Amino acid sequence: MELNGRRIGVYICHCGTNISATVDVEAVTEFAQGLPGVVVARDYKYMCSEPGQNLIKDDIKQMGLNRVVDASCSPRMHEPTFRHACQDAGLNQYLFEQANIREQCSWVHTDKEMATEKAKALVSAAVRRVYYQEPLETREVPVNPNTLVVGGGIAGIQAALEIADSEHQVYLVEKEPSIGGHMAQFDKTFPTLDCAACILTPKMTTVGQHPYINLMSYSEVEEVSGYVGNFKARIRRKARYVDETKCTGCGECSNVCPVELISEFDEGLSKRKAIYIPFPYAVPNKAAIDKRGYPPCRVACPAGVNAQGYIALISQGKFKEALEVVRRTMPFAGVIGRVCTHPCELDCERAKVDEPMSIRTLKRFIADYELKVGREKATPVEQTKEGKVAIIGSGPAGFACAYDLVKKGYPVTVFEAMPMAGGLLRYGIPEYRLPKKVLDNEIDLVKELGVEIKTNTPVADLGGLFDKGYKAIFLGTGAGNSLKMGIPGENTTGVIHALDFLKQANSGAKVSLGKRVAVVGGGNAAIDGARVALRLGAKEVTIVYRRSRAEMPAAAGEIDEAEREGIKLHVLAAPVRVLSQDSRLTGIECIRMELGEPDASGRRRPVPIKGSEFNMDVDNVIMALGQEVNKAGLPKDLDYTGWGTLSVDSTTLETNISGVFAGGDVVAGPSDVIASIAAGKEAAESIDRYLSGTDLREGRPEQITRVKEVSKDGVGKKARATMPMLDLEKRDGSFTEVELGFDEKTAIEEAKRCLNCAACSECLECVKACEAQAINHEMKDEIVEVDVGNIIVATGFQQFDPSVIYQYGYGRYDNVLTGLQFERMSNASGPTGGEILLADGRKPESVAILHCVGSRDENYHKYCSRVCCMYSLKYSHLIREKVPEAPVYQLYIDMRCAGSGYEEFYERLQEEGVNFVRGRAGEITNIAETPEEEGKLIVICEDTLVRRKRRLPVDMVILSCALEPTADADQIAKTFSISRKADGFFLEKHPKLDPVATMTDGVFVVGCCQSPKDIPDTVAQASAAAARALAMISKGKVEIEAATAVVDEEACSGCKICVDLCPYKAISFDEEKKVARVNEVVCKGCGVCAAACPSGAITSKHFTTEQIIAQIEGVLV
Amino acid sequence: MKYYTYFPGCSASSEGGAKAYGWSSKAVSKVLDMELRELDDWNCCGSTPYSSVDELSSLCLSARNLALAEKKGLDLVTPCSSCYVMLNRTNSRLKEYPQTKAQVDEALAAGNLEYHGTVRVRHLLDVVVNDIGYDEINSKVKRNLGGLKVAPYYGCQVVRPRPSFDHPENPQSLDKLITSLGGRAVPFPLKSRCCGGSLIISEEALALGLIRKIFDSALSNGAECLITPCPLCQTNLDAYQSQVNKKFKTNFNLPVLFFTQLMGVAFGLGEEDLGLRTNIVPAERVLAKYI
């Protein structure tokens, strides 16, 4: 009976017997007839069929129905069908409601009575709801004719070509440097045994040249927004560091690259370089550089020397080029290679395998090599800048500063008070540690570049320098004053402070020493003083140090050598007075110490033991207590810190006087050479900016990220090279260098231990080799945004990693391979040139192929990977062809050969004499039980057809591994708003009738990312998705669902809760009116905003509160 | 102090064939500050051979122990790998098969007992290496084993069939334990393979073959002795070693100790705690080389 103008028609479907077998459809129909508003109720066998639909249409026209309820299957199935039927008959499609009495009733219950009652309740709910439904209009939006294809394997290539051939634009995004995907890795394809590359490369080439395909390789889609017909995709084009427009693909860069990495394309069977083209038929055929961040050595070096760079070149025997890498940063390779404290070695990743790399000694090696073969005179740098720079102090800080500035084109003059340049490098460090000729060679290099050095020229007045026309000044005067002890008798003749002693010895001056010498102190200067004293003729040298040996700050190696040379260590003692007779030094009175509480440096404080004084008879005392800055030698108006060092800005190194910068020991106090070099370089940067008028602070300090994870897979232990030392007998009285350095063979072997943490080492050899000048190491990632109407996701699969199945020995035994590894081995362009070989180079005498590794397995993947039976047959064929004498065993559960020509292929292999064993392998072992099994891999399996356990001794085992979803499938699903099935592959809209569409309109999934399949099916799906996209493009417009949310702006309180909650970012906020507004086109009608709105200002159209309450009432009442 | 309810099982109990295992387990636990409180009125765990003959009765026997242990509220720790498997299997069966549980509940009720499935059954080896830890064990070593080459023989039941506290094919806990005692672990490929178990009784030839392979493998990797966490394995390898030699004309002379015996040696415990006299292949000669 009509109710308040509503004339409702109710239609109950039998759905064959799907519904009627469980639900008494006639009873439900009768029940429906009596519901409020219902003017007609019918039942029919197949409501969705043409006659069924006609029932509805006729009743609408003839009985004037203005509401329709259909009780049948899920709306997901047929809501569109019935909505269209209503619309066709002239009734607005939103005046229709579908009650699901199949999936939610007849299919899940067995009790007929209760199912019928439930069906009645569902129908009643629908009737009450439809009463409140209002007509709504769908919107039509235009469809952007561009398409985004994600993934450049065969699926993506096929889809792209089909759409592009219709002269519509395609953006093809591929994350690897080349398209081709896994198919490019295959050898032959089943069942025709066509070569995969032969059938794939023509398509790849066409893609690369197609006018309608914009190929973005080495790129990934980061974000997608919008809706069907109107998507916006943000794509990150990763920096290749190679200009694609210039690169000719000649490969010269790879030839010179010193860094070898594991080739992903060859599945780990071969190496590739850091700059590489993945395979010969790559599209685009352009190189790419693999950079993984900064290596830890480079990050740890205060001066930023590129250690990985020079070590990689040494490993290739390119010593001259290696030295060039060091000299890009600083001139002192030979010096630093001997005396540096090597912070780089402390963070070396190699230490996690065995021991850190000998980074320092390798640097020394290349510098010494240069001395051996002779250095070409350096070309003076052209002076392009006007500002003259004065550098005061020719120690490492001053030189590093001068070097950087002269290379930038500045006129630089270094002022040095001493007779020769070098600072403590010459006057402090002894000859047997740092030969003068090494230092002189590197100083000469700096001079040849154009730096003027004025020795014997102390400078006290900075103003004078400015008057002479210098525009900027760097103070690198060091901390060359010795600390005094302050004990009585310190001024006695025969007491000398270490720095003065070393200065004299290093100047070649005659120093007279008695037989017995005491050296007071525990730092490097003390050891240097002691070992020099020994060489100058002292017979008994004793080092007196107030703490214990473990706390001596000198380098451990130096202390060891001192002891080996015969120097005694008297620890936990300190002098309290110098003893003399007739003004001649006779000895020192000392007191014993014990260690007390830690002091400010964290070391335990030495505490004198009362009454423990004792005398030492000595002829000379060398005091090596420490260094401090010589304030007297510096200009008056500078600011100092509390430590007595120069005060400077920590970023710019500028002093309180404008244009005057400082660094090194004069600022930091006594520290190490590399820190001083770093300071000199930093000051050079500051001076350059100061003189060019650019901001001193911008972008400083430079942010660099250390590479995070460095794989140690397959790296065997190898001991670090040891430093050969001069025999003790040969050292007697001579200043010959004690540490002898590596020879060529040792250096190369040691350099090969480097893990190449950052992949590309930035040695820049490729830049030199590239004739097309296509390489640019400064490139950055680029972001591109595209507008498209459809998206086809074709991201493929990854191969299951069988190392988790311990019993199969993958990764433990040499000759157990995965399927893809075998493809590469068999491929003529692969690592073995197409020959089937064992790891030791022999041909296998027998091979076993195991099916279902990781598939059909409760422990890993339950599904069948579909292609393995066929490719296993293919492998058998390839082996029989290439190694005809080798028996091949295939261990299978079932042979799945359904496809055109597949069964015939199986028969062919049976005729070729492959041994088919029906049973799974339990284990692969190398423990032989009989002589025939010695040296073989034994496959222990069950042969279910003969009902016996068998042992098959073979040389090679191939594991036919499962195809599984890619590791980033989760990420992809989120980006493209698609779901994943329980097995991890992407969810299609309907497994039978709609395998390429997804629940998200406009987004399609094709190929193996949807489920494992072979190439013909993949190509078919790709074409199907292309057709769907083209259909939409051809129509030019698409209907948007009308059930969206709408905000009542008067009721809206402006709280903005809905804005953040919307998962589709469909709600914007009008700042002027202070109200929220829903973009109806983006809104998917999920209802979250409506539920959350505290003012109740949001209505979900077609899901109003009234409608829902009515529905609930219908069920309960 | 850590507290556990202790289930020795028939073999490791004071009257059992592996009584030395019981003595050494208790003594070593004392050193490690573990209090093992023997479960009052415990009965046979149901036993692996019996469970193949009459599974339901075996489950009931096992469940009785669990019901008693549940009242104590602590983890139930056993040194015997068979008891470990049986008690854990009972827990799983009762959880996965409600009909079986109903029958077992009925049996328990007849004895005024109930079991709610809350007892965690653990192996003594698991507790020692995971609850106490290698560092603590190392700190209690008084007599460093001096590089004695010990082959860790796990047997199969402590790592399979269900996921356990160590890798099912390549377990490491005994290996690391040997190192922490100052010995040199000699891992060998058959370290977690079956010794034949109770088939030594019904299929002696087969079991002797399996035992022979284990000795071959351990010896060829340099073992001077073996340790094991299972009484059945220990019996098979120790008591039947002469049978193996007779049958296969080998001359193995490898002492087979319980892991707790080796720990006790390293901890400096005395014979009344170690029970080395009860081992059939004498251990003193090998141990004396280093200690």
Image (cartoon, rainbow, N blue to C red):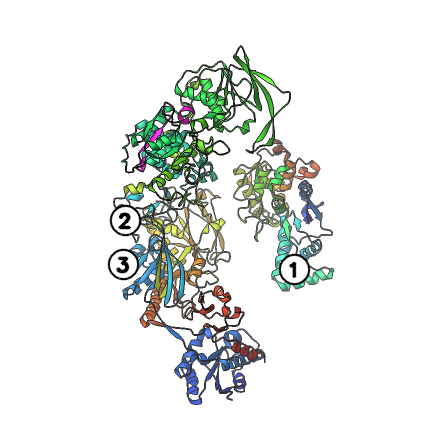
Is any part of residue A331 visible from this angle?
Answer: no
Question: Which chain hosts label 3?
Answer: A
Q: Nearer the viewer, mark 3 or mark 2?
A: 2
Residue B126's x, y, as percent? 61, 47
Whole-number angstrom distance, CA of label 1 to CA of label 2: 76 Å
Whole-number angstrom distance, CA of label 1 to CA of label 3: 70 Å
Residue A417's x, y, as percent? 38, 25
Residue at x-position 46% and y-position 63%: A981
Q: Nearer the viewer, mark 1 or mark 2?
A: 2
Going by the numbered disc 1, the residue's amino acid type is Leu
Q: How many marks?
A: 3
- Residue marked by disc 2: A247
Q: Nearer the viewer, residue A1098 or A1021?
A: A1098
Question: Which disc is residue B183 wearing?
Answer: none
Q: Is residue A946 above or below residue A655?
A: below
Going by the numbered disc 3, the residue's amino acid type is Thr
**Most frequent secondary structure within the magenta stretch:** loop
Whole-number angstrom distance, CA of label 3 to CA of label 2: 19 Å
Mark 1 Cα-neighbour bin, 10 Å: few <14, some 14–19, many ≥20? some
- Residue marked by disc 3: A206
Residue B89's x, y, as percent? 62, 55
Question: Which disc is residue B56 wearing?
Answer: 1
Going by the numbered disc 2, the residue's amino acid type is Cys
Mark 3 Cα-neighbour bin, 10 Å: few <14, some 14–19, many ≥20? some
A57 relative to A118 in the view: left or right: left
Question: Which chain hosts label 2?
Answer: A
Mark 3 residue element: helix
Question: Which chain hosts label 1?
Answer: B
Mark 1 residue element: helix
Q: Nearer the viewer, residue A78 or A146?
A: A146
Residue B94's x, y, as percent? 63, 60
Residue segment shown in magenta: A406-430
